[in-house]
Image: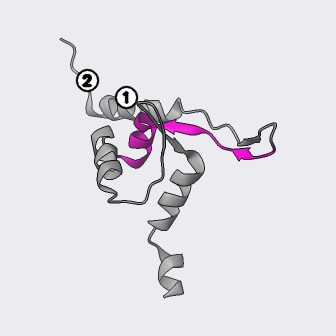
Amino acid sequence: MQLVKPHQASTARRSPISQIPTEPATKTQSGSLLGRLLSDAEVSILLGVTVHTLAVWRSTGRYNLPYVKAGHLVRYKESDLEEFIARRTVGAATQAAV
């Protein structure tokens, strides 16, 4: 059994984020702007929560994080995720407005 050093383990956990493509949204033939759809696994990595936590949020409506459901697949629009993060960002700009 090979032991993993702590800094290697944390790098291993972060590596999936670097694999997420950062492609800009493009217009479809109908002219609507369609951003990337992220899987629940990708969103869980980006938010730092488990896939199970996202499922609980969806079923209870605890947070207003819109999602797309197609059969058993759950996807999140990249733009919705960005808005979700922006609404929950606390900082100097937020406090200055108060």
SS under mark 1: helix
Q: Position of residue 88 (x, y in %)?
A: 44, 66
From this viewpoint, is residue 7 visible? yes
Whether residues under marks 2 and 1 lie with C-beta atoms below 8 angstroms apart, the answer is yes
Task: Report the residue at 54% width, 33% height from top.
Answer: 20
Asked if the magenta segment contains residue 40, the reply would be yes
**First along the sequence among labels 2 and 1:** 2
Image: 62 above or below 75: below
SS under mark 2: loop
Task: Report the residue at 53% width, 29% height from top.
Answer: 19
Q: Quadrant of the N terminus?
A: top left
Query: Which residue corresponds to mark 1?
Result: 12
Query: Which residue corresponds to mark 2?
Result: 4
Identify which residue, 6 or 21, lies in the foreground. Answer: 21
Query: In the rendered structure, which amino acid carries the disc numbered 1?
Result: Ala
Q: Which mark is residue 97?
A: none
Identify which residue, 75 or 97, lies in the foreground. Answer: 75
Query: In the rendered structure, which amino acid carries the disc numbered 2?
Result: Val
Task: Report the residue at 32% width, 43% height from top.
Answer: 55
Q: Quadrant of residue 74?
A: top left
Identify which residue, 24 or 35, lies in the foreground. Answer: 35
Residue 6 as seen in the image, left or right of residue 13: left
Q: Position of residue 29 (x, y in %)?
A: 81, 36
Q: Where is residue 54 in the image (x, y as percent from the top left)?
A: 34, 46
Colour style of the rendered protein structure? one colour
Image: 76 above or below 64: above
Magenta stretch?
31-49
Q: Which one is closest to the eye, mark 2 or mark 1? A: 1
Image: 41 above or below 61: above
